Image (cartoon, rainbow, N blue to C red):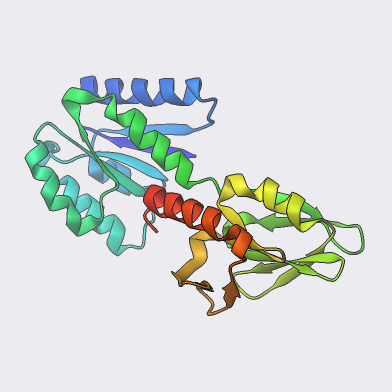
């Protein structure tokens, strides 16, 4: 995980980095932290997953303009703005800011880091044995659903590809639940992130596939889906 800091004042830069380092150390999270004194220096690489960016930089640099450049270039990093003037936060709607950190309350960085790392829970691979006993790696971020297929499990990916693997649906649902998946009925586990619509009887996924929610799963599904949406803003 790459974290960037763009702050022209070395005192603040060191304070911010210290807070991030402590959080990652306490949570046993591996991360690479790079600090920059200007937006110009950062833009030479611009490879952070999460960027702490001062709004008012030296030599007239504007943090909002830097964030806008990143967005226009298709950069997917999340931006946390740093400021001593919280009234400026209202301007961040232009660049879909992830958080605003008041420099007088740097402890707010911990909350931002916590939410950010939680949103990355699907950035991992799982191992499954296919029908020939060969280990297959499944990217959870690209996994749309898992369904029973005879005595096997069918893993359907976003691009339409599929993997047929050994396993039991109940055990698989339990192991995947911590990563944002839910068993909506006896035969289906779905990725909550890719649910487009929910109605009284079922769901519609981003690829147009419809699935019925089992009566015994309905109440718990609604609770988990609501929690997911509230937490990650999908």
Q: Does the rendering let one see residue 198?
A: yes
Q: Residue at x 47, y 33 (%)?
A: 32
Q: Is residue 7 above or below residue 105?
A: below
Side (left or right) of 186 relative to 206: right
**Outermost residue, front side:** 215
Looking at the rendered structure, the number of numbered marks drawn on it comes to 0
Side (left or right) of 87 relative to 99: left
Of 72 and 203, the residue lying toward us? 203
**Outermost residue, bottom side:** 208
**Outermost residue, right side:** 132
Give how far across and how far down residue 148 sits, in percent.
Answer: 77, 67
Give how far across and how far down residue 17 sits, in percent.
Answer: 34, 25
Q: Does the rendering let one see residue 123?
A: no
Image quadrant where residue 10 sits: top left
Q: Residue at x 35, y 29 (%)?
A: 110
Give how far across and how far down residue 87 sits, in percent.
Answer: 7, 41
Q: Is residue 226 above or below residue 160?
A: above
Image quarter (top left, top right, bottom left or bottom right) of the C terminus:
bottom left
Of 207 and 98, the residue lying toward us? 207
Give how far across and how far down residue 191 sits, in percent.
Answer: 57, 60
Side (left or right) of 70 relative to 122: left
Q: Residue at x 72, y 71 (%)?
A: 162
Of 213 and 136, the residue lying toward us? 213
Q: Residue at x 55, y 51 (%)?
A: 180
């Amino acid at each position: 995980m790459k974290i960037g800091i763009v702050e022209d004042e070395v005192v603040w830069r060191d304070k911010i980095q210290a807070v991030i380092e402590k959080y990652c150390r306490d949570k046993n999270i591996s991360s690479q932290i790079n600090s920059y004194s200007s937006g110009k220096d950062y833009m030479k690489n611009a490879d952070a997953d999460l960027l702490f960016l001062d709004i008012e930089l030296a030599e007239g640099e504007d943090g909002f303009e830097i964030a806008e450049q990143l967005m226009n270039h298709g950069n997917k990093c999340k931006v946390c703005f740093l400021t001593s003037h919280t009234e400026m936060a209202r301007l961040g709607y232009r660049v879909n800011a992830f958080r605003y950190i008041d420099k007088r309350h740097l402890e707010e960085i911990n909350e931002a880091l916590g939410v950010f790392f939680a949103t990355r829970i699907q950035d991992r691979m799982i191992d499954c044995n296919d029908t020939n006993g060969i280990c297959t790696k499944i990217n959870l971020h690209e996994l749309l659903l898992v369904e029973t297929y005879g005595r096997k499990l069918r893993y359907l990916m976003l691009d339409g590809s599929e993997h047929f693997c050994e396993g039991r649906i109940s055990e698989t649902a339990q192991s995947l639940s911590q990563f944002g998946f839910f068993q909506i009925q006896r035969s289906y586990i779905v990725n909550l992130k890719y649910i487009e619509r929910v109605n009284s009887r079922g769901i519609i996924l981003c690829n147009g596939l419809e699935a019925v929610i089992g009566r015994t799963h309905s109440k718990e599904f609604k609770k988990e889906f609501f929690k997911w949406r509230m937490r990650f803003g999908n």
